[in-house]
Amino acid sequence: MKAHVAIVSASLAVVLVQSSFGQFSDFTPVPNSAGPIPIGDPGEATPMTLGHPGWLQATIADRATQNTLVPNSNSGNWDMITANETGSNAGRYLFMPFETGTAGVQRIDLQDPNYNTRTTTIIAPGTQGFVSGDASRWTPYGTYLTAEESWSAGSSKGRLFEVTNPTTAGANAGTFVQRTVIPRVSHEGLAFDSNKALYFVDELNGGSIYKYVPANPNATNGNDYFAAGQTFALKVGSGGQNEGASGAAITGSSSWVAITDLNGSQLAGVSVLAGDGTVDGRATADVASVSATGYNRPEDMEIQVLPNGDQMLYFATTDVANNGGNGRVYNLNLTSGEVKLFADAASTDLASNAGAGGAFRNPDNLAIDSQGNMYIIEDRGGGVDDDIWFAKDLNFDGDLLDTGEGIARWASNGTQGSEFTGLYFDKFDSNLAYVNIQHPSSGVDRTIQVTVPEPSTLGALAIAGVLAIRRRR
């Protein structure tokens, strides 16, 4: 049994521990998107319409509390979530950046029952001019990565940073190191494969997919991992296509084209340099000798292992204007090199057994549960049409084309002005998941914990409810 206990709402007055009973895939599709919660209403603390009436939700951290306790410590726009997935106290902490003009990083201690002390800003807003923090990933050797979703020619941004002491840092005391070997792009998704190569994207209409292969994949620290390595850009077919230009899905065989040398430095005749001498990943991907494929606003990335051992790199493209703005989710088989379309508006909505159409739009974040199921999070307006979709791939073959497969609305967000971000399934407790409510109109960003209770807990809650009703009577 897992050592740490999960935090739930104090109003429930119960502690839930790890169990093999709960499965997030056991639900009834939510038929419609959630309606709006009044701005600032207490209902914002539990804003999700969930696919199972027995699941619990609770706010475990919020921006207003952070800034009340330590003024100006939290600039908001809480984005992608990860945990300390390895090392001492693995699974105890959640980490997330602030996607603002003065970005930072915060840590939530899941073992701290005190609401007012469990959340700590470990990278102060604006440190090293950090802006638009978006990416969030734990490294194979036990540190935390984040990066800036901000890049254009002549910019000083587009940087990837490592917090080298994420679990031990005190308030504003994280060691924040820029890793200049990674080319400058507008970052969002980060993912490591089993060989410890690092994948990333350029979030741009026409942005590319990239892979960094370290010279020392078994490094035990960031200085060694990022000391030297080669970056490649993905080319599908003959390359040069742009998803937005034609509106058509870009699939087929692919290859990786080098855009740096083996040390991560300029590749003669290929690499375009940024103003500080680092490599401009965006401009280099467009060089004729590279001709990397351009997808429309590539966003998050996840790697799923198929039953045959193949690794599938999934990536979402949020904005495809000629496709009605619906967006798509693709996957790349890292063994065969084949790129396939995984989900889009034509995918079967399992609630209606018809194409999802406009109900499925702007896929942004991706997440994988303990069973290997994929979840797709929309970048849309809370209280209007901001949903999380479950992708039912029965045979885990990387498509949703078989009988009974498709997508189903798993949860919906009623917080006005916000969006879901960073859905993360606990790697040590299959009953727990976390998601952020970002940039709400109320200004109160939140981290929500979703729990599948144990059967004994459900019984205890039911008995407690009956007793409470009897006492009131």
Image (spheres, grey):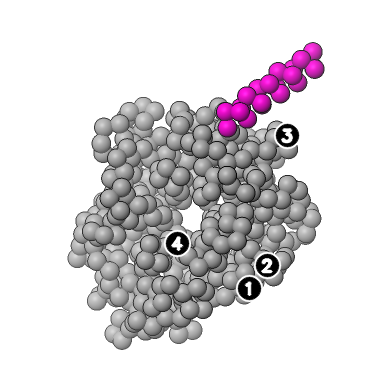
Residue at image coords 79%, 13%: 473
Badge 4 is on which residue?
A: 190
Residue at image coords 43%, 72%: 218
Question: Disc 1 to disc 2, how far (Cα)?
Answer: 8 Å
Badge 2 is on which residue?
A: 169
* Residue sitting nearer the eye, 118 or 443: 118
Across and down, in percent, residue 42 comes to 71, 36
* Residue sitting nearer the eye, 259 or 449: 449
Question: Disc 4 to disc 2, how far (Cα)?
Answer: 23 Å
Badge 1 is on which residue?
A: 175
Question: Disc 3 to disc 1, how far (Cα)?
Answer: 37 Å
Q: Which corner quadrant of the image does residue 343 belong to?
A: top left
Residue at image coords 65%, 70%: 174
SS type, badge 2: loop
Which badge, 2 or 3, is on the more N-terminal residue? Answer: 3
Task: Report the disc number at residue 13.
Answer: 3
Question: Disc 1 to disc 4, how far (Cα)?
Answer: 20 Å
Q: Nearer the viewer, mark 4 or mark 2?
A: 2
- Circle 2/circle 3 CB separation < 8 Å: no
- The stretch of residues the image draws in magenta is 454-473
